Image (cartoon, rainbow, N blue to C red):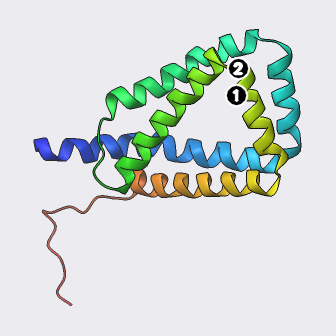
Amino acid sequence: MSLTDQPQMRTRAFARVLGPLVVIVCAAAAARTTEMYSLTSDLAANSMWAWVFGPFVLLGGLVIVALHPYWRGLAAVVVSVLGWLVVLRGLLLLAFPATFISVARSVIDQGDLWRGLCIVCAAFGVYLSYIGWMPLADPTVPRQAT
């Protein structure tokens, strides 16, 4: 593997993990829209949950940002932006949990907006899954003449 292949391989590795995760989480969130508001109520009722989840969310985002500093190509941009959004989410959970909950509730209350965002995010997840799991062309295999 050449040095120039490393960013593409790193992006593919992250896409293999993040793509299916994003699809599953977004599909579940869209399907369970009515339960999302009560989940935010539970989070607001006990500040311990922000302290439990916040560091893990922040850590996950920082791992993505630290191990994927690439911004060339759509897949690399999607992975990097996703990493920074997870960092932001972790910071908001830790430093400003009330703001995080307020914003989440206002988006969830919009119903169609919430489902639309979930669908868009799931589409990015499908794209990342495709990029991560599609077979690479083997340059040593001769192509058939057409």
In-image side of 94 versus 137 (left or right)? right
In this rendering, is residue 39 above or below 72?
above
Kind of element beneath mark 1: helix
In this rendering, is residue 89 above or below 71?
above
In-image side of 111 versus 50 (left or right)? right
Among the 4 quarters of the image, the one containing residue 69 = top left
Mark seen at residue 100:
1
Residue nearest the observer in this picture, 97 or 32: 97
Q: In which quarter of the image is the C terminus?
A: bottom left
Q: Which residue is drawn at 48% across and 52% down?
A: 129
Task: Give the amino acid type for the residue marked by disc 1 in the picture.
Answer: Phe
Relative image position of residue 140 (x, y in whole percent): 12, 62
Report the Cα–Cα distance between label 1 and label 2: 5 Å
Relative image position of residue 75 (x, y in whole percent): 38, 52
Q: Name the residue under label 2.
A: 97
Residue nearest the observer in this picture, 137 or 107: 107
In this rendering, is residue 68 above or below 52?
below
In-image side of 85 versus 110 (left or right)? left
Among the 4 quarters of the image, the one containing residue 97 = top right
Relative image position of residue 5 (x, y in whole percent): 18, 47
Residue nearest the observer in this picture, 101 or 43: 101
Q: Which residue is drawn at 12% across and 41% down?
A: 3
Task: Give the amino acid type for the residue marked by disc 2 in the picture.
Answer: Pro
Kind of element beneath mark 2: helix
Q: Which residue is drawn at 89% across and 44% down?
A: 34
Residue nearest the observer in this picture, 31 or 17: 31
Q: Residues at badges 1 and 2 in contact (C-beta under 8 Å)?
A: yes
> Does the rendering let one see residue 1?
no
Q: Quadrant of the N terminus?
A: top left
Packing grade of label 2 (10 A; few <14, some 14-19, many >=20) is many
